[in-house]
Image: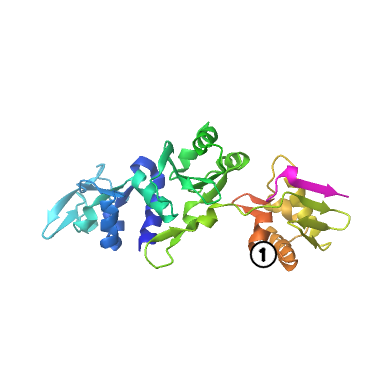
Amino acid sequence: MTETILRLLTRLSEAGDDAILSGELAVPFFGPVFDRLLAKRVLVEQAPLADWDVCDACECGLPCRPIRKAGDGYRAECPLDRRQDIDLTKDDLRVFRIGADALASVIGAAAGFAAAPKRAAENVWRLGDTPSGRAVFLALQPAALTGDGMATMLRLAAQDSDITILAPELPAGAVRRHHDAGFHLIETLAVLAPASNGHGAAIDVAALDPIPLAPVLRVRTATAEVQWDGRSVILSRQIFPVFERLLEKALSRDQVASGSHVEGTTAREAKDLIRELRDAFKAAGFTDAESKTLIMTVRNRGYRLGVPAPDIVVDG
């Protein structure tokens, strides 16, 4: 229950200062867990609603319709068509503001950070440090990470530590800027899970560290051999051209290969080619996570190698 409502509040908080939880959405969560969130001011109850949205396609010209007492309940009345009236309960009229600072504290606690989060920038918190020494930041709104100078502000707040950022899904441009700055971006909802004891929510702190990459990826084009992390795989002549297209992009300014670029003239879908390529690495002893770290999916854009260009050596 705690994990479910935290996921809901995290998603709603993307609206920023206007983030609210309606009584209609809150009702299924009423109980001890909800009361604790109120006590921690993750949720702050506001004055009950006094009006309701007008009917779809209503011609009354009103900005909203009044809510009136009706017996033991309430009714949002349409001035033109009584059939459009909506019967409401007292709980339907309740409204809760989402307290961003308190929500950040709960998310930090889920990751095992004992200290209260510290504001690093507007709507950005430093939750703490991982055992490996990475500074972990949380942004609840995409806009919080899209401003000019944000990378500099985070570096100052991190005091030269490596940086991991928990955030909502960001625009592609912002993702590229933060990756180029050397930051490790993670979608908060992707790591927020039920606690192992069945109570509450948890974030595995190990998931906040990027999977370490070997310093060099060596490619021998003459033999279709790829060496990485102390292991070697010789790709088939059918699949090696797919790897070469990813390699071409990795060594260019735009490191992401679109689906059509991956497909080339094969008449096969990019996702099938990428799966076959990853399978070739797994057959050579790489884990599924390692194959996906080396051959990364970039949402809504395509695929890229997970090794920076300076760490790639190509031999003939």
Q: Quadrant of residue 83?
A: bottom left
| Residue found farthest to the top | 149
Residue 65, horizontal then vertical, whole percent: 22, 47
Residue 194, horizontal then vertical, whole percent: 42, 63
Residue bearing mark 1: 287
Camera-nearest residue between 17 and 311: 311
How many dots with numbers?
1
307 falls in the magenta region: yes
Q: Which amino acid type corresponds to the residue marked 1 in the rendered image?
A: Thr
Residue 282, horizontal then vertical, whole percent: 71, 66
Is residue 49 visible in the rendered image? The answer is yes
The residue segment tinted magenta is 306-316
- Secondary structure at numbered mark 1: loop
| Residue at 59 percent of width and 52 percent of height | 210
Residue 96, horizontal then vertical, whole percent: 27, 49
Q: How is the image coloured?
A: rainbow
Image height of 289 relative to 51, above or below: below
Classify mark 1: residues with Cα within 10 Å, few (<14), some (14-19) or many (20+): some
283 falls in the magenta region: no
The quadrant of the rendering that contains the N terminus is: bottom left
